[in-house]
Each structure stands twice: as C-alpha cells, then as structure tokens.
Amino acid sequence: MSLSSHRATDGSPPIHAKDSHFFSYSLYGITLRSEWKLPYAECLEPRPPIVEMLKGESSVFHSVALQTDSRSDRQPDFDYRRLDDGSHYFCWRDLYEFLVPPDGHRIIARFFPGASQESFLPYLAVGGLSFCLLKQGIDPLHATAVAVNDRAVGFLGKSGYGKSSLASAFVRAGYPVLTDDLLVLRKDLDDFLAYPGPPHIKLSGEIAVIDFREQLAGIEENPRTQKVTIPLNPQELLRTTVPLKTLYLLNRPRSVERMSTITIRRLSQRRALLTLIRNSFNDWVTDTARLKLQLHSYAQVASQVPVKLLSYPRRAALLESVRDAILEDFGR
C-alpha cells in the first residue's frame, strides 16, 4: 500500500470497498471515520467535513526518510517531518506513527508491536486531527473548556499546567466538559463558537482518584504521560457548540509555588495575541502558510474574547476555591 493509493483524484476522501468497516465519530465539528473502534459513542449521521483514519501498512512508511525536506524536528520521544509532497509525518517512538496527506482528509497510521492501542488511540486521533485541522484552515488551541450557563470557559496552558485538573473541579459542581486539551473555535457572527471534543478527560492519578473513582475501573495509567484517560458520563459532557466567553491562561506551576492567593488579571490585546500563539495545540508545523493562518485567526480571537492570566497555588485542596473565583469573575 503506498501513500498515493489513498489519494482520491478529485481531492475528496477516498471511496473504500463495501466490505471495509468504519466507525464514525463527531469531534471538533468534523466526522472522523476510523478503521479502529474508538472508546466513544458512534455518530449515527456522519456529516462533512470528513476525515478518515486508516490503518497503514509498513510499506507506506518505509520511504518516509527519503521523502523529507529540510523541515524536520526530532526529539527523544517524538519525530516530526514535513515530506516533499506537503504531507506531514509524525512518530511517537515505540508507540505509533502516522501520515497526513496534503489534502488533510486522511490520517494513515500504524501501531508498533507491543504498543497498547487502547491506551494510545485517543492520542493518535487527537494528534492526527490537529494536522488535518491546520490543512483545513483551523488552528486549534492547547486548551480545555467547560460550559457555564451556555457559554464556554477555556483554560490555556502547556501540558502539566493543570487545565484538566481545574476542569475536574467544575465537573464536581455540575458544569460539563466541552473539550479537553484541544479547543477548536469557529467565527459565527459576533461570537466564536467552541466545539466539543472527545468525551474524556486526562488526569493525573491523584486528581483522578479524588474525582472519578467509579470510572477508573479497568483503566490503566499511561506510563508515558503519567495520566489516566477517563471516559466521562453523559451528564459530565456537553456535545453541542457554545459561544466562548473567556479564556484563562494558567500561570506556570513553578512560578506560583510560593503563592497563597488567587489572582485574575486581564491581558492587553497584544499580550493576548502572543498568549494565543504560544498556546497553539500543534507547534510542529511552522511553515509560512501556517504562521499566516495563526496570526490571522488568533488576532480575531484576541480582539473579541477576553484573555486573562490566572495565578494560583497548585494544590488539589484549593481547586474548588479557584473554580469559585473563576465563576465570580465570569459573572461580572
């Protein structure tokens, strides 16, 4: 199977044999048709745009090293390369690798021997979709969002900053999760609509045990990330789009070690734009087209959505107080 064998002549998603079985899911306002069964409820009425996640044979990936141009980024655990034809290649070492062709409608992937597909399928789906979204002109943020009074509240921050832990405090109070880790926004008249992501939340073991003890049965902690991917119950989720009201940037955990208070400060529009750029979900793609998309889309968000710096001590016992401070600020 070659990469070109997946490509449709008219740029649309390929047509597969009738005996091919796909599972359909609605994520971030698109339909993901996957040859793997994901731990999500299936979408009964698939609607465009459609992205297909296909099982790739080893032959698809053997020629990757020969196709790369100068734009590559290799790290101890990850390997990203942009190929000569504009495709994107990504590898999480010893776990999985995938290709996203130039049209952005397919993720061609495979798992390496010994890798737990169950543990890493959610990572593959979200990571692959981030490249597809960029191809389709959507630049996602590295953010978790909850719904409060039919409005979205987003928490910006790098991995380990506490976005999901803070969201879990909102779940405890009856506020549903809209998306965890990747936030897609689309302009709609005077608002930016926030779109629902996968129906799960990724938490450290301590927070997971505190908030989701009943849902932990049979779920193993991910040794690579020290987090647990927890499926959420229907009452803990919002599956419709809602307008985004505010984004809160979580301060670096180390910078607030000695803090004893909770502070919220609105950023200027210029600082808000820089904050959004620094907290894009996919920081692998840095070509000119992506940077133009990023600047254009984030400038619009920064001009209309308040972005505020949220600083608080990183202690589980204080999360409810942080939540209440956000709710008070949100209601002003």
Image (cartoon, grey):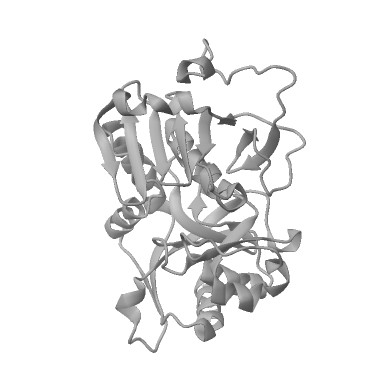
Q: Left or right: 163 with respect to 179?
A: left
State the residue in front, 106 or 94.
94
Q: Residue furthest bottom?
A: 260
- Percent position (x, y) of residue 159? 41, 61
Tell which residue pokes out farthest to the front in this image: 113
User: From what the image shows, is residue 109 above or below residue 159?
Assistant: above
Q: Write the residue at 54% across / 14% down.
A: 8
Which quadrant of the figure has residue 220? bottom right
Write the residue at 39% across / 34% down. Answer: 89
* Residue toward you, 221 or 24: 221
Front-most of residues 190 and 155: 155
> What residue sits 42% from the left and 24% below the top?
102
Q: Is residue 332 left or right of residue 216?
A: left
Judge whether residue 155 can be spotted in this image: yes
Q: x, y (%) of residue 296?
A: 34, 40
Most extreme residue toward the left, as rendered? Answer: 70
Q: Would you say residue 136 is visible in this rendering?
A: no
**What x and y, as percent, mark residue 199?**
65, 54
Give percent across and percent down for residue 65: 31, 29
Q: Residue at coordinates 58% horizontally, 30% vertically from top-left?
A: 54
